[in-house]
Amino acid sequence: MSTPLPNRIQLVQGDITKQHVAAIVNAANSSLLDGGGVDGAIHRAGGPAILEECRAIRARQGGCRTGEAVITTGGRLPAAHVIHTVGPVWNGGHKGEPELLANCYRNSLRLAAENHLESVAFPGISTGIYGYPKAEAAAVAVREVRQWLAAHAWPQQVVFVVFDEENRRLYEQELAN
Ligand code: ADP
């Protein structure tokens, strides 16, 4: 049985690389290499072990498709693992973006469950360089995490990590609904 909501969801404003959770989620790109934004911050803070595993995954399966997710070590991060997922680039909203973004959350949560990870922290996938409107992205994130937690015992905790004030407000609104 799952713990009743909303106890299993937390909202934190800050830097995802500092979170003490079993896994942090990275908004990666499909090459699994050379990202900016949160990806750059994660590789800088976690050190070369993360990139080494990303390269190995790339050699094995040719990167990661939009909506899918892969897991690596967290290197020197406080989090033991990084789940890399590739969000959709916003293209007006009629190119399957909402379903692809939902897949990012579901596939990341599935990897966390399969690996029995107790806690997972998510950034606002696609809401930076990829241009997904923040309000719509927050709605997808909260809906997908709630649906997952209602049906699964793992992960036990999910932390939404927002960087800016605007995202904090949007997540607060979604979580209050
Ligand atoms: P994408 O390419 O998927 O849009 P970005 O890395 O550009 O990914 O941005 C995703 C979100 O992560 C944005 O909302 C951005 O403000 C946020 N972000 C950037 N750096 C960090 C960080 N260190 N911790 C948490 N969130 C971050």
Image: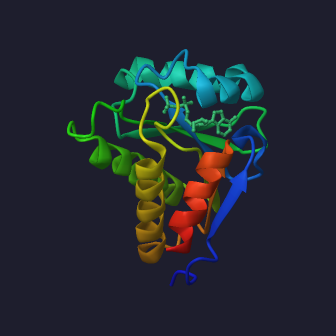
Nearer to us in this view, 23 or 137: 137
Q: Of residues 42 and 54, which is closer to you in this image? A: 42
Q: Is residue 45 above or below residue 148?
A: above
Q: Is residue 122 above or below residue 127?
A: below
Quadrant assignment, res 170 = bottom right
The quadrant of the picture showing ligand 1 is top right
Count of numbered marks:
0
Position of residue 133 measured from the top left corner of the image (x, y, whole percent): 43, 41
Residue 80 location (% of width, % of height): 71, 44
Relative to 135, say whether 85 is above or below.
above
Look at 54% across and 44% down and name the residue there. Answer: 124
Q: Position of residue 161 (x, y in %)?
A: 65, 50
Residue 90 seen: yes
Q: Position of residue 5 (x, y in %)?
A: 56, 79
Q: Write the residue at 55% across / 20% down.
A: 35
Please indicate, yes or no, whether residue 120 appears anywhere in the rendered image.
no
Left or right of 46, for residue 23: left
Residue drawn where x is 58% and y is 82% of the image: 3
- Say how the picture is coloured: rainbow
Q: Residue at x 46, y 36 (%)?
A: 126
Q: Is residue 101 left or right of residue 163?
A: left
